[in-house]
Amino acid sequence: MEENLASVLETVADTMDDAVAVVQGSRHRTWAELDERAARLAAGLAERGVTAGSRVGIGLWSSAEYVEAVFAVCKLDAVPFNVNYRYRAAELGHVLADAGAAGLVFDATTSAVVAEAAAGQAGLTALVRVGDAPAGEVVGDGLEDVVAATAPLARTPRPDGDWLLYTGGTTGRPKGVQSRHSTVFSASCVPNGFAKFGIPAPESLGELADRVRESRAEPDRLVTCTPTPLMHGTGIYTTLGTLVAGGRIVFPVSRSYDPDELAALVQQHRVTDVVIVGDVFGRPLLTALDAAAAAGRPYDLGSLRRMVSVGAVFSAEVKAGLLRHADADITDVVVASEGGPYALSLTRRGAVAPTSRFVLAPNARLLDEAGRDVVPGSGQLGVLAAPAPREVHYTGRPTASGTTFRDVDGVRYSVPGDLATLETDGTLVFQGRGSRVINTGGEKVLPEEVEQVVLRHPAVRDAIVVGVPDERFGQRITAVVSVAPGHTLTAEEVRAAVGAELADYKRPREVVFVDEVHRSPVGKADLSWAGRIARGEG
């Protein structure tokens, strides 16, 4: 459907009306409330200079307000984009300037950062604050004041709009991936909603209303809980897919991941779908489930039908452990802000595949340096590629766009640099992101492969492996490791664990122990921090 997402969500709102759309703690937002509040916020943003085509950042924790802000910006045919609420002023200022932002909806606790970042941004005219700002740090206008003081924006026909998603920036400054609402609908909303039930994608707003009406009558309606922040593509696309299909989204109250809270939410709200980030979320969840069961108060996960992981390694042992507690389908997906999916892995009870083993997603390819398909069983390392619409590109970065979005055999592909090999039977072995490859003494080492071995050590809580400059070898492998509570660990034990499974040249030459490994709110490794620590700068 080549429709603006605002028109799509309005159609669902008209059909669902008083049904609950968003749950967070004791707060329940119905579809009618969601639509009206978004319309009022849209009018308030318009009064503050936001027009069609304007770009508006959203720097909020997951909440109904986040959904309302996206909805409101789309109602104006403006362009929403994600902002990391952990940014410092310089980082936030860069993204706002890069996007040419006209507005920002932000959490009040970040007011001081917003004030500093907004200074000198002449085009930034609309600042809307969610929550109460600390004393002396009042910036912008309060969301509730804007909603209360503004009449709802009248509905009007809107064209298929622009969509902007900023990458995590783990290996460089964030880049804005620009696409269209229709692309988001077909590539994200449908797979995260209707496709889960084998329902054909609607081709008109009328068909959408019919599909949603049918889903509302289903006793096993889609209820999704995602502890993955909405500022990450996985979080927002999962949320939109659930809502567009007439489902209900459940957000945790905690602003940091709490596995017991997640398990309790599944039990309380009869959640059918959970979205996590590999072992970063899965391992603590398994620990919580095991502890609850051992204490004689196991969580009831009987409603859970599907668990999806995106963005980090999801080990076979953690999957198997989770399946002891929930009889659900576990889907591990290789995807990127630039597109995908590239590869998929489905796990069920009694059939747990080895870690990082996948199959190519439909229409995806594994390409060699010449743009040819890698031959299964050849052992050759290739890059993953998935079809990408012509309109998808990095905003303001033609050179980077040309590198990532390539024409192969007359088809445009997204090739962000994820590496893999193909076994003889077609099994894809994922090797990680090519931009992280360590060249040590002429040998290429994939840090994700080393990380997986280190993380399997029972005394390791978390780890990141990076390459640091070395006068003799070019780079040396360094592991930044945090130790699990109640355990002790030495550098030589880490090196021995790696050497027991991998070639000697892949052993970390140095191991740096830290109290906590830094990761983003979605579990992605903070590579800049790890590099500083590994170089002794930090």
Image (cartoon, rainbow, N blue to C red):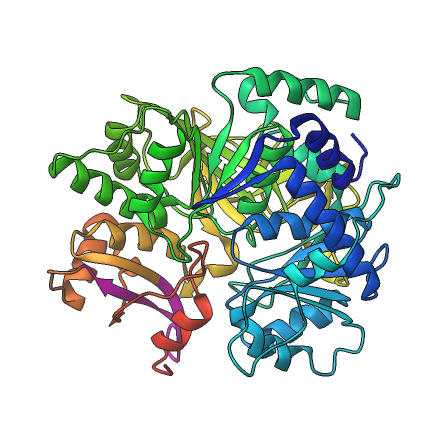
Q: Give how far across and how far down residue 67 sits, in percent.
A: 62, 47
Whether 478 is among the magenta residues is: yes
The part of the chain drawn in magenta is 465-484
Residue 204 shows up from this direction: no
Determine the main secondary structure of the stretch shown in magenta.
strand
> Residue placed at 79% from the left, 40% from the top?
4
Q: Give how far across and how far down residue 349 sits, in percent.
A: 29, 22
Which picture quadrant has residue 45?
Answer: bottom right
Residue 226 shows up from this direction: yes
> Residue placed at 79% from the left, 47% from the top?
75
Q: Give how far across and how far down residue 303 sits, in percent.
A: 37, 24
Viewer-nearest residue: 201 or 131: 131
Viewer-nearest residue: 339 or 19: 19
Q: Is residue 373 above or below residue 109?
A: above
Taking the view exactly as shown, the residue that stands out farthest to the front is: 149
Q: Give how far across and how far down residue 484 sits, in percent.
A: 19, 59
Which picture quadrant has residue 264?
Answer: top left
> Residue placed at 88% from the left, 41% from the top?
156
In the image, is 301 to the left or to the right of 520? Answer: left
Q: Is residue 138 above or below residue 306?
A: below
> Residue placed at 52% from the left, 59% from the top?
435
Viewer-nearest residue: 425 or 66: 66
